[in-house]
Image (cartoon, helix red, strand yellow):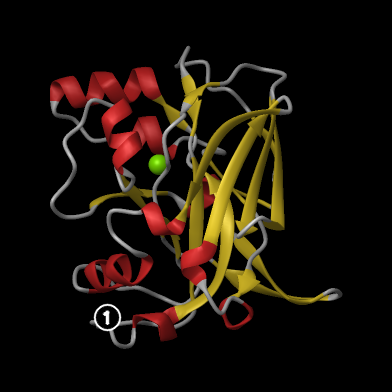
Amino acid sequence: MWVSLRRGPHVSQELSVSSVYCIGLNYADHAAEMKSQRPDEPVVFLKPAASLVAGGGTVAHPVISTDMHHEVELVVLVGQDAPLLTLANAHEAILGYGIGLDMTLRDRQQQAKAKGQPWAVAKGFAQSAPVSAFIPAEQMPDPGALGLQLLVNGQPRQQGHAGQMLFSVPELLVYLSSIFSLRRGDLIFTGTPAGVGPVKRGDQLQARLLHGETPLLQLDVEIV
Ligand code: MG
């Protein structure tokens, strides 16, 4: 699967994605709504790269679930093969920022949690990872000001900003690089703020990446 980095109004660079890392429970308000403890280290799971819906489009509601939820997330595009990053150099590994949806089969996830089983089905099903194009990191002088917003059928559902994360983007990069082989083109879904909820067929989702109050990117998804 490929994602697009917007170098300019008419110039895009395509990057091949190998791994899609996702962080759970990275906002205190979402951890609270899930009745989960604040994690003392990042909660990591993966989605298949083939589950990406790059640039938005349609997401088919899986028949195995009656409770698919939206989770809007800031997504980081990794720009280099990155062994053992430190807080001092982690920013050098960030190529771009985008907005994505970690679509989640909440009923399947709760069943898996109850049985101590993995989340692969609940989180990694086909089309579970719609993601926007990416804005180059060098055009983002203050990543801490990045915000995210989700509307469903025009109604605001989720709102948050990078400054609310329990583990910052550099901290996540350091952590992931200490365990996994981060590669150029990998994506990191950095967790969702409060307000997650169910979607149904026919719903129109608009996810926005903001800088302060300024919209930078929009991702449009229809549930079918
Ligand atoms: Mg999530």
Q: Quadrant of ligand 1?
A: top left
Q: Residue at x 22, y 68 (%)?
A: 175
- Residue 177 vertical position relative to residue 100 in the rendered view, above or below: below
Q: Residue furthest top?
A: 66
- Residue 218 vertical position relative to residue 94 in the rendered view, above or below: above
Residue 21 appears in view: no
Closer to us: 173 or 146: 146
Q: Which three-letter amino acid code belongs to the residue tagged 1?
A: Leu
Q: Which quadrant: the N terminus? A: bottom right
* Residue 77 place in picture, x, y as percent: 51, 68
Is 151 positioned to the left or the right of 159 in the image? right
* Residue 10 place in picture, x, y as percent: 86, 75
Q: Which residue is mark 1?
A: 87
* Residue 167 place in picture, x, y as percent: 28, 59
Q: Residue at x 71, y 50 (%)?
A: 218
* Residue 48 place in picture, x, y as percent: 44, 49
Q: Residues within 10 Å of mark 1 (few under 14, many from 20)?
A: few
- Residue 198 vertical position relative to residue 129 in the rendered view, above or below: above
Closer to us: 147 or 22: 147
Residue 151 appears in view: yes
